[in-house]
């Protein structure tokens, strides 16, 4: 891959995590990596035969950082390694549930790097996030 030299290390970790995804049903591997407190945490999507129990890569990575004791995540990288060009940019974007979790755990200025799309602020992806 020609862009390998310029790939952000966080994105590289997300791509590696996608290779570990458990996706026997969709065959759609997603990886994510977050940066919090100078440390990184990776996650991949994990499917289940009871589809509602499937967990997205973004939430696995975010929740892993929280479980490690972090309360604010600075940035996240997301990759959908099986998203073909026919899906376009929208086929690579985080789902609504993940955007809501990002809004709470990262705040509006959190950085969301979407592989082969661009980098966003959380507030761009979910401008009117639910809050309590």
Image (spheres, rainbow, N blue to C red):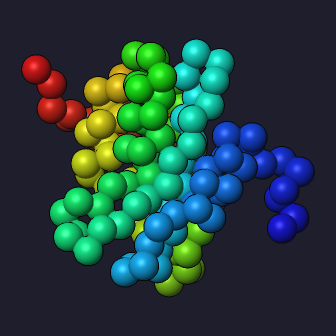
What is the number of callouts on the image? 0
Image spot of residue 52 (x, y percent): 19, 63
Instruction: Say which quadrant the N terminus sits in.
Output: bottom right
| Quadrant in the picture for residue 3 | bottom right
At 39% across and 34% down in the image, what residue appears? 63
Which quarter of the rendering shows the C terminus?
A: top left
Find residue 33 and report its horizontal and vertical position in percent: 57, 42
Up/down of 50 relative to 117, above or below: below
Q: Nearer the viewer, residue 48 or 55?
A: 48
- Vertical relation: 82 (above or below) 90: below
Residue 38, horizontal then vertical, whole percent? 65, 18
Q: Is 4 situated left or right of 94 in this image?
A: right
112 sits to left or right of 127 = right
Decide if residue 18 is in sight here: yes
Residue situated furthest front in the rendering: 49
Name the residue: 45% across, 34% down: 64
Image position, residue 73 (x, y; %): 47, 24
Which residue is pictured at 35% across the width and 66% down the height? 47
**Foreground residue among 92 and 89:** 92
- Is residue 117 something that shows in the picture? no
User: What residue appears at the point 58 percent right and 28 percent down from the top-left corner?
Assistant: 35
On screen, residue 49 versus residue 93, left or right, reads: left
């Amino acid at each position: 891959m020609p862009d390998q030299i310029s790939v952000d290390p966080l994105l590289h970790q997300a791509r590696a995590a996608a290779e570990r995804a458990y996706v026997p049903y969709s065959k759609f591997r997603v990886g994510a990596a977050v940066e919090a407190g100078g440390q990184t945490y990776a996650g991949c999507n994990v499917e289940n035969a009871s589809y509602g129990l499937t967990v997205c890569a973004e939430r696995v990575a975010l929740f892993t950082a929280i479980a490690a004791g972090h309360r604010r995540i600075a940035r996240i990288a997301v990759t959908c390694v099986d998203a073909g060009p026919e899906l376009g940019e929208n086929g690579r974007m985080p789902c609504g549930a993940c955007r809501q979790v990002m809004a709470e755990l990262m705040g509006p200025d959190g950085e969301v790097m979407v592989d082969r799309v661009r980098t966003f602020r959380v507030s761009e992806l979910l401008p009117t996030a639910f809050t309590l």
